[in-house]
Image: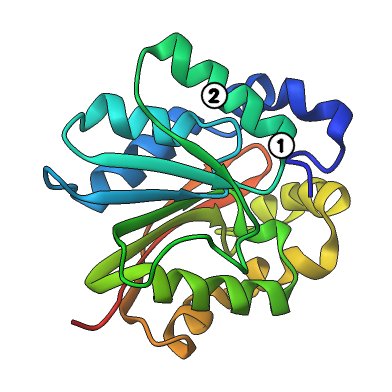
Amino acid sequence: MPALGFHCLTPLYDAIVGATARERTFKQALISQARFAPGQQVLDLGSGTGTLAIWIKQNQPHVEVRGVDGDSRILAIACRKACQAKVSVPFDQALSCNLPYQSAQFDRVLSSMFFHHLTWQNKVCTVREVFRVLKPGAELHVADWGQARNLCMRVLFLTVQLLDGFENTRDHVTGRLIHLFEKSGFVDVSQQSYYNTIYGTIALYRATKPG
């Protein structure tokens, strides 16, 4: 699934998200929330144009960051951006339900604005894969659309649903992500914060794989 629903919109993704979704605010909050330590292995799941992975590496140069996405077009943009930013961030092409990594490989998995593109079935298998590739005691940190904080946010979110689909975004409106993470084996699952945007409410989640 292209980042904005259509491949023709992919080149506009950074400009649109940066201008409308408070991108720097919530992604920097997600980075702070993850509490990285030197030497940690970090995966940006559904890395898109690579903004989050690049910012992690710039903010925490002593962690090893890599991104993964299923869209070759958007990965080409990510690779160019990493080169321009002069940071070493490899990007892999793979689907989230079949990650090409060893079990217990990563200390942190972060994901920004990716899960709402997935059907419920694919959300379930993706979270199982994330659980598999995380080390015991490691953490998942997710930023994505959440439950609307008020009626205005709910109405605004209809624009996202019209573009990205009602079925796969319904799980976010109804707050099912926390339940999904818990049913997949994660503990200490919580919503950490939220940010209202002109398209709706973005929520930040944290979950831990038992040690």
- The residue located at (31%, 63%) in the rendering is 105
Task: From this view, report whether residue 30 is shown above or below residue 186.
Answer: above
Total labels: the figure holds 2
Say which element carries label 1: helix
- The residue located at (43%, 85%) in the rendering is 182
Q: CA distance from mark 2 to mark 1?
A: 10 Å
Q: In the rendered structure, which disc, 2 or 1, sits on the residue that comes first in sequence?
A: 1
Residue at the extreme left: 38
The one nearer the camera, 51 or 175, is 51
Mark 2, other Cα within 10 Å: few <14 / some 14–19 / many ≥20: many
Mark 1, other Cα within 10 Å: few <14 / some 14–19 / many ≥20: some
Relative to 145, is 189 on the left or the right? Answer: left
Q: Position of residue 44 (x, y in %)?
A: 45, 47
The one nearer the camera, 99 or 33, is 99
Relative to 149, is 166 on the left or the right? Answer: right
The image quadrant of residue 78 is top right
Q: Amino acid at mark 2?
A: Cys
The one nearer the camera, 207 or 80, is 80
Figure quadrant of the C terminus: bottom left
Q: Which residue is mark 2?
A: 79
Q: Amino acid at mark 1?
A: Ser
Q: Which residue is mark 1?
A: 72
Q: Position of residue 73 (x, y in %)?
A: 74, 31
